[in-house]
C-alpha cells in the first residue's frame, strides 16, 4: 500500500493495514456487545416492568373512560335482550326448580335480567348512587307516628292474625274398612248418645289425635285444604262429620276456635316498622331503576317484548 513518509510516497506493508482494520472491528464489536448487555440488563429490571404495566393500564383506563363517559353526541346507549337470553333464563329456572316458569315468573325473570344489565352499565356510578339511596333511607329510618299509623291502616290485611283452632278427631281408614263412611256415621251417633271415650274408637293414624292452637295453613298442610276449610266452619264442643281428608274420613270435635283479628298498632309496631322500612327501600330502588331506564334504549326481539313492554313501553327501540 502507498503511504506518505517525509513528503515522499512509500509503500506500507499489507499486513500492517490488515492489523489496523482488525483492531477497529474488534473495538466496534466490543462496543456493540456492551450496549447489548446494557439493554438486556435494563429489560430485566422490575422497575421497568412496573412502569410498562402501569402505562398499559393507564392507557386502557383512559380509552375506556373516553368510550363510556363521552358517548356519541345525540346517540342513546342501548341495552339488548334477545330470544337467546330468554331461553337461557328459562333453562336456568327449569334446572333449578325442575319445571318451566309460568308466564308471570318468566316476565319477572326478564325484567330482573334487564335490571342487572342496567346496573352493570352503571357500575362505576353505582357505588355513589347506592350511597345516596342508603343515606336517604337512613334519614327516614324512623317515620312519624302519623306516617306509621297510615301505613298500618293501608296495609291492615298484612297484620291480621289468622284464625286458630283446637280439635280432636277420630280416623276411619277406607283401606281397613268395607264401608268407612257407614262406620263413621254409626260411631257419630254413638258419641252423641253416650259419653264413651273417643280414644277407644276409630283406626290408628300416624298423625296426632289432638291438635291445639293451629292455623288453617298448618291444618291444610297436615290433612289437605278441603279438610281444613270444613273444620274451621264447624261449631265448637260437638262431634261432627264424617269429614274427608287425604287419608280417609274423620269425626271432629272442635275444642276452641279463635276468630281472625286485627291486632292494634301497639301490638305489632315492630313488625309494621320493619315492613315500612322495607317498602321505602323498594320504592327508592324502583325510582333509581326507572331513572336508569330513561338513559337507555332497550333493544329486544319481537317475541320478548310482551314480557317487558308494560314496564318499558317508552324505552323499547326497534332493532
Image (tube, grey):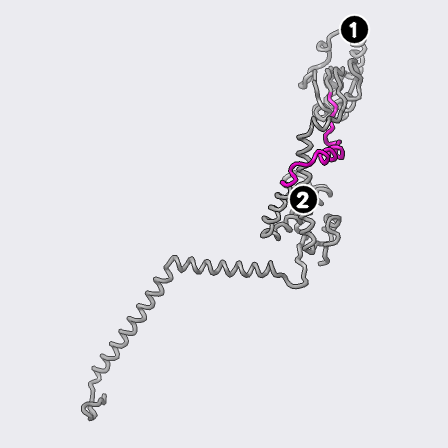
User: Residue 206, how many percent across, how many down?
Assistant: 66, 19
| Residue 183 in sight here | no
Check if residue 159 falls in the magenta segment: yes
Q: Is residue 309 left or right of residue 98?
A: right
Q: Which residue is at a point 66% across and 38% down the rendered structure image?
A: 98
- Find disc 2 in the rendering and name its residue: 284
Q: Residues within 10 Å of mark 2 (few under 14, many from 20)?
A: some
Residue lying furthest left? 6
User: Residue 139, how many percent across, how many down?
Assistant: 64, 41
First reached walking from the N terminus: tag 1 or tag 2 = 1
User: Residue 174, how many percent across, how many down?
Assistant: 75, 19
Relative to the observer, which residue lies in front, 143 or 169? Answer: 143
Task: Assign the C terminus to one quadrant of the image.
Answer: bottom right
Residue lying furthest bottom? 8
The region drawn magenta spans 138-164
* Residue 210: quarter of image: top right
In the depicted structure, whether residue 35 falls above or below residue 80: below
Q: Which residue is at a point 73% across and 27% down the rendered structure image?
A: 264
- Find disc 1 in the rendering and name its residue: 194
* Residue 154: quarter of image: top right
- What is the secondary structure assignment of the residue under circle 1? loop
Q: Is residue 80 left or right of residue 20?
A: right
Q: Residues within 10 Å of mark 1 (few under 14, many from 20)?
A: few
Check if residue 250 falls in the magenta segment: no
Task: Assign the N terminus to one quadrant of the image.
Answer: bottom left
User: Residue 285, how many percent across, how many down?
Assistant: 66, 45
In the depicted structure, whether residue 38 falls above or below residue 196: below
| Residue 232 in sight here | yes
Amino acid at each position: 500500500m502507498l503511504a506518505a513518509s517525509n513528503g515522499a510516497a512509500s509503500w506500507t506493508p499489507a499486513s500492517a493495514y490488515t492489523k489496523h482494520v482488525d483492531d477497529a472491528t474488534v473495538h466496534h464489536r466490543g462496543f456493540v456487545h456492551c450496549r447489548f448487555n446494557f439493554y438486556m440488563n435494563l429489560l430485566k429490571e422490575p422497575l421497568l416492568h412496573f412502569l410498562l404495566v402501569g402505562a398499559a393500564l393507564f392507557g386502557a383506563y383512559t380509552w375506556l373512560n373516553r368510550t363510556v363517559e363521552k358517548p356519541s353526541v345525540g346517540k342513546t346507549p342501548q341495552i339488548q335482550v334477545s330470544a337467546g337470553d330468554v331461553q337461557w333464563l328459562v333453562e336456568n329456572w327449569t334446572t333449578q326448580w325442575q319445571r318451566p316458569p309460568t308466564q308471570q315468573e318468566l316476565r319477572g325473570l326478564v325484567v330482573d335480567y334487564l335490571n342487572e344489565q342496567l346496573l352493570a352499565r352503571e357500575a362505576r356510578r353505582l357505588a355513589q348512587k347506592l350511597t345516596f339511596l342508603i343515606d336517604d333511607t337512613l334519614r327516614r329510618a324512623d317515620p312519624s307516628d302519623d306516617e306509621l299509623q297510615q301505613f298500618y291502616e293501608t296495609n291492615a290485611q298484612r297484620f291480621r292474625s289468622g284464625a286458630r283452632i283446637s280439635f280432636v278427631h277420630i280416623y276411619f281408614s277406607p283401606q281397613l274398612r268395607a264401608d268407612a263412611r257407614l262406620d263413621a256415621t254409626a260411631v257419630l251417633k254413638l258419641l252423641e248418645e253416650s259419653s264413651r271415650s273417643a280414644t277407644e274408637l276409630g283406626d290408628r293414624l300416624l298423625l296426632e289425635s289432638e291438635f291445639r292452637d293451629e292455623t288453617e295453613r298448618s291444618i291444610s298442610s297436615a290433612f289437605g285444604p278441603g279438610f281444613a276449610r270444613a273444620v274451621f266452619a264447624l261449631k265448637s264442643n260437638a262431634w261432627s262429620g264424617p269429614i274427608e281428608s287425604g287419608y280417609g274420613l274423620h269425626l271432629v270435635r272442635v275444642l276452641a276456635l279463635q276468630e281472625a283479628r286485627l291486632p292494634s298498632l301497639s301490638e305489632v309496631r315492630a313488625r309494621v316498622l320493619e315492613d315500612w322500612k322495607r317498602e321505602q327501600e323498594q320504592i327508592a330502588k324502583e325510582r333509581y331503576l326507572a331513572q336508569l331506564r330513561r338513559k337507555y334504549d332497550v333493544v329486544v326481539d319481537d317475541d320478548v317484548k310482551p314480557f317487558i313492554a308494560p314496564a318499558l313501553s317508552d324505552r323499547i327501540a326497534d332493532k
